[in-house]
Amino acid sequence: MDRQTISALAHADHPIAAPLDPASVRELIAKAIRRGDERLLDLGCGGAAWLLSALADHPRVRAEGVDLSAPALAQAGEAATALGVRDRLVLHHADATAYAPAEPFDVVLSVGATHAFGGLLPTLAAARRHLAPGGRVIVGDGFWEQPPGPAAVEIFGGLEDLPATVDRVTGDGWVPVYGHISTRQELDAYEWSWTGSLSSWALDHPDDPDAAEALAVATTHRDEWLRAYRGTFGFVCLVLRLAAQ
């Protein structure tokens, strides 16, 4: 199974696709939207859960999402239609790292997609290219809550602790104006949902040629979470502004 298919199945019951609950997403978006008529861009939007939340809560906001997953974008379009916000949402089937919009955006989001850009700072560099003067960025990435073991480092690579992560961001010219550290409940709910949704799909489709692989991926992921990084891996979302504009 390709990564996009696995991700779509694993996030079926957790469309936020990051370890946050809907109230946390709404609060972060509210901190980034100041006037109420902003244009939002989500780089690596997946099923566009963040944009859908913003559009539902802020009736004058308009949004665009970019992602490589056609199934996720189709799902986003259907959800937007059901919410009655499809006329304010534009979806692009494209590589977010190479996307070049004609105009800048007031709010740029990229949560849980830093791997696509090569890390946190390259993600912020991409966001900066698309950001209007005075705009805000919402970025979400992992950090070490506790010193990691070798297995956790192998899974997640060169993360840092929270102070060092924030220092990297501020050293790159950004000022945090709000943030959210995922709670243990949010982190655990995300992992149970990821592994459970994928496992359930495999059990519900025993004759599918990909069922055995899906169940194996879910099992491996669950074991890595429980044995290698639960209690060690954390997730932070920051609302940022540029220090000098």
Image (cartoon, rainbow, N blue to C red):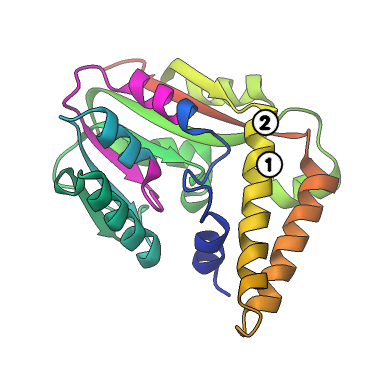
Above-or-below relation of 113 to 74: above
Where is residue 84, by image quadrant? Answer: top left
Disc 2 element: helix
Q: Is residue 206 magenta?
A: no
In the rendered structure, the answer to whether residue 54 lies left or right of residue 217 reads left
Residue at 42% x, 24% y is: 28
Say which residue label 1 marks: 158
Work out whether residue 130 can be spotted. Answer: no
In the rendered structure, the answer to whether residue 129 lies left or right of residue 240 reads left
Residue 171 image offset from top left, x and y in percent:
50, 21
Label of residue 185 in the image: 2
Above-or-below relation of 203 to 233: below
Work out whether residue 146 can be spotted. Answer: yes
109 or 85, nearer to the observer:
85
Badge 2: how crowded within 10 Å, few (<14), some, or many (20+)?
few
Where is residue 134, by image quadrant? Answer: top left
Between tags 2 and 1, which lies in front? 2
Badge 1: how crowded within 10 Å, few (<14), some, or many (20+)?
few
Disc 1 element: loop
Sequence-first tag of 2 and 1: 1
User: Magenta segment, which residues?
Assistant: 25-49
Residue 216 image offset from top left, x and y in percent:
74, 69
Q: Amino acid at mark 1?
A: Gly
Quadrant where the N terminus sits is bottom right
Label of residue 222 in the image: none
Q: Amino acid at mark 2?
A: Gln
Residue 89 image offset from top left, x and y in percent:
21, 46
